[in-house]
Amino acid sequence: MFQVYTEKGHEIITKTMINEMADLDEAIEFAKKAIEGKPELRYIIEETTGVFNSYGEQIATVVEESD
């Protein structure tokens, strides 16, 4: 699964998940449309595999992000 986030100004406190999708190409298109016309936002797409760390948090890998 791919989780799509928006973030304002590279601040982790503003990171918000806006969607979860199975297809990476669809996730990228969705993310680009979500920040279109909003120069203060950027997107981050993370892939999850269902693996959890010892704290019970799901492990995710960033696969795509805007500047």
Image: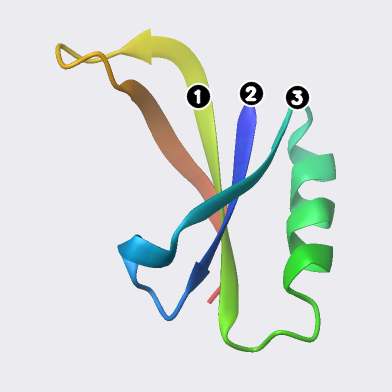
Query: Residue 19 sits in which quadrant?
Result: top right
Q: Is residue 32 above or below residue 20?
A: below
User: SS class of the residue under badge 2?
Assistant: loop
Residue 57 position, x and y percent, is 29, 21
Residue 39 position, x and y percent, is 65, 89
Q: Which residue bears the numbered disc 2? A: 1
Query: Residue 42 sits in which quadrant?
Result: bottom right
Mark 2 → mark 1, Cα distance in angstroms = 5 Å
Mark 2 → mark 3, Cα distance in angstroms = 5 Å
Q: Nearer the viewer, residue 2 or 9?
A: 9
Q: Which residue bears the numbered disc 3? A: 22
Tell me the kind of residue under disc 3: Ala
First in residue order: circle 2 vs circle 1? 2
Mark 3 → mark 1, Cα distance in angstroms = 10 Å
| Mark seen at residue 48 | 1
Q: Residues within 10 Å of mark 1 (few under 14, many from 20)?
A: some
Q: Nearer the viewer, residue 49 or 8?
A: 8
Residue 36 position, x and y percent, is 80, 77
Q: Is residue 11 above or below residue 43?
A: below
Location of the N terminus by quadrant is top right
Q: Residue at x 33, y 62 (%)?
A: 12
Furthest-left residue in view? 54
